[in-house]
Image: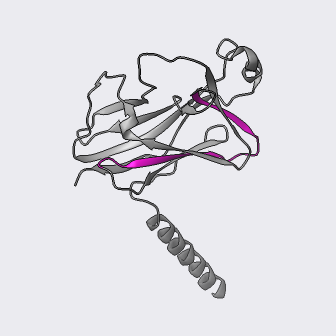
């Protein structure tokens, strides 16, 4: 009898803890699954803006150290572009769009281009800010796309690949030898609003 009472109390305690943990999560938050030790977590950053800003965290949830190729760096690393991150956004009408990072303007790139390589040891986290005004829906070629007031859903996706010997600069061919994390991993999906 005593054991049954203790078991019931343990179950009630567990359910109460689960309820409070779930209620503390941000609205629209849903845990994403890690892929080969890498997990993405997308969150909304607070701030005054017509369209919200986001932060994407890369979590190495495994014990093995990882190396990520996030995109490209220009001007000896002074400008960094995480081209390997795309945004998947759905509007309130159910229309899905893929958004890609807008690159440097000015009709071409002059000077040195290096891979944007990030080492991520086991248990480490790396994060980047994501601003919607720096992305456009290239797949649907809506170059003048504007977010109208309403509700949207967003998830980020990382497309991991290696750096080929051709992509590495002559004085940095060694970067093509790194064991890069390769594959595709998606973040949690968040609901956000634009406008009042």
Quadrant for the C terminus in the image? bottom left
Q: Specify how the rendered protein is coloured.
A: one colour
- Where residue 21 sits in the image (x, y, percent)? 51, 67
Residue that lies at the very extreme toward the top in this rendered image:
166
- Counting labels gives 0
Q: Say which residue appears at 50% left-offset and 43% top-offset.
A: 187
Quadrant for the N terminus in the image? bottom right
Vertically, is 187 above or below 171?
below
Q: Is residue 53 magenta?
A: yes
Q: Say which residue appears at 45% left-offset and 26% top-offset.
A: 103
Residue 163 as seen in the image, left or right of residue 174: left
Q: Say which residue appears at 54% left-offset and 72% top-offset.
A: 17
**What secondary structure prevails in the magenta region?**
strand
Relative to the observer, which residue lies in front, 6 or 83?
83
The magenta-colored residue range is 50-72
Quadrant of the image occupied by residue 180? top right
Relative to the observer, which residue lies in front, 42 or 70?
70
Relative to the observer, which residue lies in front, 113 or 110?
110
Residue 160 as seen in the image, left or right of residue 46: right
Residue that lies at the very extreme toward the bottom in this rendered image:
2
Vertically, is 70 above or below 62?
above
- Where residue 108 sits in the image (x, y, percent)? 46, 16
Vertically, is 160 above or below 66?
above
Relative to the observer, which residue lies in front, 2 or 74?
74
- Where residue 179 sits in the image (x, y, percent)? 74, 27
Quadrant of the image occupied by residue 66? top right
Q: Say which residue appears at 36% left-offset and 22% top-offset.
A: 139
Quadrant of the image occupied by residue 90? top left
Q: Is residue 87 magenta?
A: no
């Amino acid at each position: 009898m005593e054991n049954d009472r203790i078991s019931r109390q343990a179950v009630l305690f567990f359910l109460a803890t689960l309820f409070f943990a779930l209620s503390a999560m941000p609205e629209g938050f849903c845990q994403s699954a890690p892929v080969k030790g890498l997990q993405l977590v997308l969150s909304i950053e607070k701030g005054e803006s017509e369209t919200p800003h986001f932060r994407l965290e890369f979590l190495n949830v495994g014990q093995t150290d990882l190396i990520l190729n996030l995109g490209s760096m220009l001007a000896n690393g002074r400008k960094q572009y995480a081209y390997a991150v795309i945004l998947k956004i759905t509007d309130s009408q159910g229309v899905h769009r893929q958004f890609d990072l807008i690159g440097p303007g000015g009709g071409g790139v002059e000077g040195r281009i290096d891979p944007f390589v990030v080492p991520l040891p086991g248990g480490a986290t790396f994060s980047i800010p994501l601003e919607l005004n720096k992305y456009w829906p290239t797949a649907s070629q809506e170059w003048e796309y504007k977010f109208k007031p309403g509700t949207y859903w967003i998830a980020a996706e990382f497309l991991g690949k290696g750096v080929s010997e051709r992509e590495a600069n002559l004085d940095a061919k060694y970067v093509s030898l790194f064991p890069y994390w390769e594959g595709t991993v998606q973040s949690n999906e968040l609901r956000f609003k634009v406008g009042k």
